[in-house]
Amino acid sequence: MTGHKPLRVLITGASSGLGAEMARQLAREGCRVAITGRRKEKLAKTAEVVRFNGGECLELVGDVTKLPLVKAHYATIENRWGGLDWAILNAGVGDSENARHFTAENYHWTFATNVGGVVNWIEAVLPDMLHAKSGVIAGVASLAGYRGLPHSGAYSASKAALISLLESTRVDLRGTGVDVVTVCPGFVKSEMTERNEKDQMIFLLETADGAKRIIDGIKARRRVVHFPLRLSLPTIYLLHNLPGFIYDWLASKVVKRSKKPYIDESHRHKHEG
Ligand SMILES: NC(=O)c1ccc[n+]([C@@H]2O[C@H](COP(=O)([O-])OP(=O)(O)OC[C@H]3O[C@@H](n4cnc5c(N)ncnc54)[C@H](OP(=O)(O)O)[C@@H]3O)[C@@H](O)[C@H]2O)c1
């Protein structure tokens, strides 16, 4: 992809969903792929798929919230490949919680992964990218970051923070050769969306479709990669700018219609090591 040299790509959160599928697709394009995730067996499955599709793979088992571990993982990549061309910071979590049963723990856990995991990796990869005067840092945020969605306070807030921090980082790094891409998907099939109410996920995309759109957006160095357009355009340009009192009224209708329990902890901590 860059002349004859295979592109060196990191994908965090590649043990399932979008991350695993991006790893597969990039392997087919001849990339070297470093993958991270906490679940060893699932990560090994992704590695197997990457190798089957012709890509060299580095498996890095562990938690993105732990900075020393993230730095050790980057040192392994640096030793093996001399650095990275792309860092796709995709690892993320999201549990549903109605604020009537507010827990600080849900916020701490969600922010530690969705924001903390990204900043840990930026600190690890950025110095070498700046030195090389090239590289792409792509952070996977969400359309959920454009408004405080019902049942999703922690998730929406973490993705809003991510959108802002990626934007600031992009502006600061302008002219350095390092590009920052913000990825805002709509609904895509994955382990995360399996837990959602089906009738509330409009324009749900297949995982392969979502992964391809992200990769194409990064290749094009788009500032913000958002999709599908029929959901992202109204979200970014309409819902985001809707006066607060209209938004509150609309969103409370969604809460009333929802059959979701107030707290869904079914997934939380399940994979913590
Ligand atoms: N699917 C959608 O509709 C959608 C929409 C917008 C944005 N997104 C974003 O897309 C990204 C990928 O999610 P997905 O939909 O593909 O869901 P997924 O299948 O649940 O994948 C999430 C990945 O993140 C990893 N992960 C979670 N916590 C981690 C931690 N502390 N350390 C390391 N890895 C961790 C998981 O691996 P382990 O459990 O093995 O650690 C898993 O590989 C997330 O950031 C999500 O917020 C998804």
Image (tube, rainbow, N blue to C red):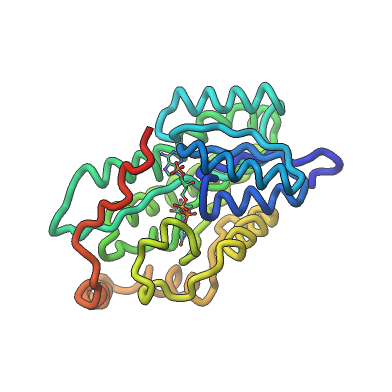
| In the displayed structure image, the side of residue 270 where residue 187 appears, left or right | right
Query: Would residue 178 be visible to someone looking at this image?
Result: no
Q: Nearer the viewer, residue 245 or 17?
A: 17
Residue at (30% x, 62% y) in the render = 148
As drawn, which residue projects farthest toward the left?
100
Q: Nearer the viewer, residue 204 or 116?
A: 204
| In the displayed structure image, the side of residue 20 where residue 197 appears, left or right | left
Residue 150 in percent (x, y) is at 26, 65
Q: Is residue 116 above or below residue 266?
A: above
Residue at (55% x, 27% y) in the render = 73
Query: Would residue 87 be visible to someone looking at this image?
Result: yes
Specify the quadrant of the image occupied by residue 133.
Answer: top right
Residue 88 in percent (x, y) is at 57, 45
Q: Nearer the viewer, residue 21 or 86?
A: 21
Residue at (58% x, 27% y) in the render = 74
Q: Is residue 150 above or below residue 9?
A: below
Specify the quadrant of the image occupied by residue 229.
Answer: bottom right
Quadrant, the C terminus: top left
Residue 90 in percent (x, y) is at 51, 47
Residue at (47% x, 39% y) in the render = 39
Q: Is residue 99 above or below residue 69?
A: below
Residue 264 in percent (x, y) is at 25, 56
